[in-house]
Image: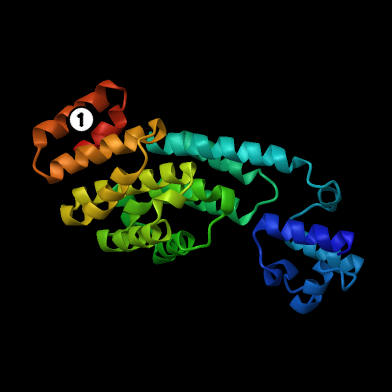
Amino acid sequence: MNYIGKKLKSLRQELGLTQTEMAAGVISVSFYSKVERGLNDIGVNDFLDILQEHNVDPKDFFNDFKSKKANKEKLVSLVNRFVTVSTEDNESEIKNIIKSFEKIKPQTPFIKFIILLARLIAETHNETAMKKLTNKQRNTIKNIIFKESYNDDEYYRILLIANLIQVYNVDEATFFVKSILRRYHDITKVDKKTEIALSVLLINYVDWCFKKKEFKLCKESLDYIKQLPDDIELAFPKILGLYFDELIHGNKEKAEVVKKVLYESGYKVMVKRMEK
């Protein structure tokens, strides 16, 4: 494999593109495939056109993407900040984080996905706003939910989806959650970070079902949460799972005790949401 072909393949994988998407109509897919394998040499103009199509500076391409590590660290920091402020309904900070996402280069599919969801979350902090979403926006989120995983970014993908699960009616949300649970049905094979993301998604789904008085739909999600390891990182969602489980079984006094503990522990925003 020649130098250019190898680096083009590396860039394509980093951007999360197929060979067809990477070729971008500049050259044929079959020709591009042979370039990656070192069987064809690509012309300078075609090479530069392909980089331009994907907003990649030639200097960055030949510098082995020295900024990649810095961008990755920045992305992780921004996503962590975003998940925190989105649960606190901090709209001004969400907008600042979106601007920071938009400055990251290159704009990979995952970063574009985060920006899309961030904008939607910023616009859908209440049911009235959620109802204003267009069918196109709703379908975009559906497509994102069923995309292949983004490898190490799967944790963040599920967390962001969790923030939007209540955009849909209960039937649609149930379909999404069941599909995701099928993907991760074997808990023993789920990594720690994904366990945390799944627990957040399932709690938000159960909360949505409670608001719509669809209590019978909560069992599968609550059972899944119960099966998660008793690790400190999962303590909060497991406590919330206990709260909802007590309500399902009519143990309102026990549920109130759990809610009081959460309130006194500093989770006032979460408790207020549970009371709605």
Placement of 140 over or under 29, stated as above or below: above
Report the side of 196 relative to 227 (left or right).
right
Placement of 163 over or under 251, stated as above or below: below
Q: Going 40% across and 55% down the picture, which residue do you hit?
A: 186
Q: Going 37% across and 36% down the picture, which residue do you hit?
A: 234
Which type of secondary structure does the marked residue at label 1 adopt? helix
Residue at mark 1 = 258
Q: Is residue 119 visible?
A: no
Which is more toward the observer, 71 or 107?
71
| Badge 1 amino acid | Val
Report the side of 75 relative to 268 (left or right).
right
Q: Quadrant of the C terminus?
A: top left
Report the side of 209 relative to 61 (left or right).
left
Total tally of numbered discs in the picture: 1
Residue 1 image offset from top left, x and y in percent: 86, 64
Placement of 149 over or under 80, stated as above or below: below
Which is more toward the observer, 62 or 52?
62
Report the side of 12 relative to 132 (left or right).
right
Residue 102 image offset from top left, x and y in percent: 62, 46
Q: Going 65% across and 41% down the picture, which residue do you hit?
A: 72
How packed mark 1 is, by other alpha carbons closer than 10 Å (few <14, some 14-19, many 20 or more), is some
The furthest residue to the front: 188
Q: Colour mode? A: rainbow
Residue 32 image offset from top left, x and y in percent: 79, 72
